[in-house]
Amino acid sequence: MSNFKASASYSGTFQDVPSSHWAASSVRTCFEYGLMKGVTSSSFDPEGSLTVAQALVMADRVHEIYASGSSTLQNGQPWYQPYVDYALENGMISAGEFSDYNTAVTREQMAAIFSRALPASELTAVNDIANIPDIAGSPYKDEILMLYRAGVLTGSDIYGTFLPDSSIRRSEAAAIISRVAIPSERKNVTLMKKYVWSDEPSVTVALPQDAADISDNGDTSFAGSDSFIYLSTHPENYPSDYDITAVSAADLSSMFTEGFADAGIAFSCAQSSMVKFGTLKAYRTTGIMNVDGQSADSIIYTYIDETGLKIIALATFGNDALLKTLSDNLTVNGSAAVPQI
C-alpha cells in the first residue's frame, strides 16, 4: 500500500466540482494519486454515469500501482482493450462476464471489480457488519459485504441499503476507489437493521445488527450488546378516540414505573414532552431503566391509535449516540417524531 503516493497537484482543477461538493475531497484524492482523470482538462462530470470500461480502468490503475508502483497502461483499439486484457490476466473479471464494456456499470458490478483490485488481505474488516438488506440475491454479495466491512462502502441510509442494480455516478465512484487505494479514507460505520412491528405495520424501528428477538408474553422485545427495545400494545387501556394529551405527565410516569416494575425493571422518569408523528400526537419520555442490574438511558414514545395505547421504549447502556440513532430513525405512519409547539 505504500506504493500509493500523490504524484500530481490539485488546485481547483475541475470547475464542476466546487470545494462545497460532497465528493470534492475524493475527487482531489483521485486526481492527485492518479486514480481518475476528468472528462476534459477542466471538467470531471461528477453526475455522469460510469461505464464498465471506465470501472476497469480505475481498478487496473489500483492493481498496477499496488504491484509495480506506477500505472502504465495506455489506450488501444478499441480504446479499452488493454484494460480489459489486464483485468482478465489479473483475475479482476472473468471471460464472458461482460458483453458490452460501453454500457453503464451497475453498483454491484463495480463493487466486484474494485474488490479484486487489491489482495483480500489489504481489505481487512474495520466494521462489524452481518448483512446488507438488499444484496441477498446478488451474485456479488460476498464482494459487496467485504467492501462494507473494510469501510469502502457505507450504503445509502442507516441500514446500508446498497441498490445493487442501480448505475453509479462518477463522484460516487471517486469516493469508493479512493477508499480502496488509501486506507485512511475508509469509513467506520454502524449500520442498523430495519424491523417493521408486526402488531402495527405502520411502525418501523431501526435495530442494532446484533439485536436478538427476546419477545415474551405478547410483547415484542429485542436485546443487543448495549441496547434494549420494547414494543407493546394495550388495547384495553384507552378508547381510540382518547386524546393522549389528557394523560398527565405524572400519570404517565406512574404507569411506566409500575408497568416496568412488573417486568422486574426499575424505571425513574426524568421528563415528558409532546411530539407528533405526522398528525399523531404522542409523548416522548426520557428516563433511566435498570435492567438486570445495568443502568440504561431510555426514550419512551407513547400514543393512542385505533388499536389502543402503544408504548415504544428504546434504551441503551452507556451509548448515547446509539440511543439518538434509535430515536431519530423510529417512524410511525412514515413520520419521525417532531416536537409539538
Image (spheres, rainbow, N blue to C red):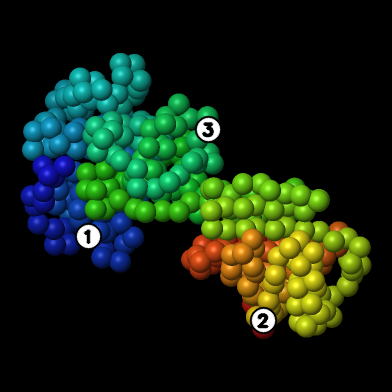
Which of the 4 quarters of the picture holds residue 249?
Answer: bottom right
The residue indicated by pointer 1 is 15
Query: In this rendering, would 5 be left or right of 20?
Result: left
| Residue drawn at point x = 8 percent, y = 50 percent | 7
Instruction: Please say if 34 is above or below 200.
Output: above
| Residue drawn at point x = 58 percent, y = 49 percent | 211
Q: Secondary structure at mark 3?
A: loop
* Neighbourhood count class around disc 1 (C-alpha, 10 Å): few under 14, some 14–19, many 20 upward: few
Query: In this rendering, would 340 be left or right of 79?
Result: right
Q: Secondary structure at mark 2?
A: strand
Q: Secondary structure at mark 1?
A: loop
Place of residue 95 in the rendered image (x, y in percent of width and height, measured from the top left): 30, 16
Spatial CA distance of label 2 from label 1 is 52 Å
Place of residue 77 in the rendered image (x, y in percent of width and height, measured from the top left): 16, 23
Place of residue 52 in the rendered image (x, y in percent of width and height, measured from the top left): 31, 31
The residue indicated by pointer 3 is 136
Which of the 4 quarters of the picture holds residue 123?
Answer: top left
Query: In this rendering, would 85 be left or right of 254?
Result: left
Instruction: Please say if 201 is above or below 73.
Output: below
